[in-house]
Amino acid sequence: MQVSVETTSELSRKMTVTLPEEKISQQVESRLQSLSHKVKIDGFRPGKVPQAVVRKRYGQQVREEVVSDLIQSSFYDAVRDEKLNPAGMPEIKANKMDEGDGLEYEASFEIMPEFVVMPIETLELKQFTSAVADADVDGMIERLQEQRKRFDAVDRASIKGDRVVIAFEGTMDGENFTNGRVDDFPVEIGGGQMIPGFEDQLMGAKAGDHLAFDIAFPNEYPGEKLAGKSGHFEIDVARVEATVLPPIDDDFARSFGIETGDVDELKSDIRSNLQREMERALKARTKGVVMDQLFDRNKIALPGSLIKDELRELVKPYRESAKKRKQTMNEEVLREQLEPMAKRRVALALILGKLIDAHAVKVDPQKVRLAVEDLAASYEDADEVVRWYYGDTSRLKDIENMVLEDQVVELVLGKAKTTQESIDFKTLMAAATGSAPGLS
């Protein structure tokens, strides 16, 4: 086998592989010999078919199979001998493969980048701390009250927080876009469920009022026919309903699973849940800082094939969501928007891989178990969730990868220069809901 390698760009290689005809013919003859003992051809006893007959009928097919197998095996032998580390599958172009010519093909592919990770001892990182205050618990109680609120009809003009039940229809250029008249439609003033300006028009309305107004739809409105255009609404107010929050008493506590009805016990449970959410958010925020530093301090060339693969995975949920909602999606624009994230994820995966190898980081089974139990804690039957994860190695693999990432973060934090920074609970949680930690 003869091999030559051409560097076509920083990470791109074109490798030419040549195999002599005798290597192909030997394997072809061997397979035809084996085939002659198995095939059934009219006029010949089983196992007694002459080699010439087998070659005439199956020779071309067998040669194609041999050539295909030799391309695959010789490619991996060649990259091993040339000490190349392909980043993806090669693009194969056969130059010679006819009988008597031997085999010559070109394999074009990208290689994994060679780089050295910046010493983690040089990193300067912030570690965040926080605490759950009484006001945070009270705030959660108020949100739970909102979940249990009811609406009672009132004989007055509507104010912010009221629910106004309406019948309405919308038109644009005289054409109805609400599929006729919509009856008994509840709108909570200040709830933000309608397009901007709609709820404001209902302020001060009373039962029996008729309203008419024009409102412009936002440019980013999902319905293309309405986006950025002005619609006309005709509205009849059926009734105005005031918000009534439940009292914080034993019935309220029982409605959230506190059998004793003890409000203090409910608050204790809420504090524990908030503490757990806080710990997760702190961990995610610190992890994000570590990932940012690793990404910013280690600039490496990235194989386009890996970026393409990552983009495919990032686009997949958007495509499935659009299909489910029967909406069209501009995939080209979406790919452009997601490309920076794809590059970051690919780069961090390579950097983390280097750190894992350099420091011999092995996934800790006990930490995997704790991670699974932590995820399961928010479910009613936590034990069943734990069994679900451990019942499938692919599901558990996702947790193991997450834990391995976390172990690398711990490694970095243990060696880098760190400073403590306190952050209040509300700010921490607001930031946590707007971003995802890790490679994203």
Image (cartoon, grey):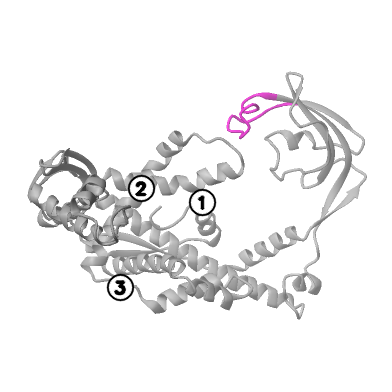
- Is residue 224 on the magenta stretch? yes
Stretch in magenta: 214-230
* Corner quadrant of residue 412: bottom left
Q: Position of residue 299 (x, y in %)?
A: 24, 48
Q: Nearer the viewer, mark 3 or mark 2?
A: 2
Nearest the viewer among 146 and 13 is 13
What's the CA distance linking mark 3 and mark 2? 26 Å
* Residue located at (77% from left, 32% from top): 179
Looking at this view, is 131 or 403 the one in front?
Answer: 403
Q: Is residue 114 visible?
A: no
In the picture of the structure, the residue carrying the numbered disc 2 is: 309
Q: Residues within 10 Å of mark 2 (few under 14, many from 20)?
A: few
Report the residue that reaches farthest toward the top: 173
Give the labeled residue for mark 1: 434
The reply to whether residue 363 is in sight is yes
Type of the residue with mark 1: Gly
Above or below: residue 325 compared with residue 354? above
Labels 3 and 2: the sequence-earlier one: 2
How far is disc 3 from disc 1 in space, using C-alphas?
A: 31 Å
Identify the residue position indicated by label 3 in the image: 362
Main SS of the magenta segment? Answer: loop
Q: Nearer the viewer, residue 61 or 295?
A: 61
Instruction: Identify which residue is drawn at 47% across, 47% down.
Output: 316
Locate residue 51 relative to residue 428 in the image: left or right. left
Front in this rendered view, residue 108 or 103: 103
| Mark 3 touches mark 2? (CB < 8 Å) | no
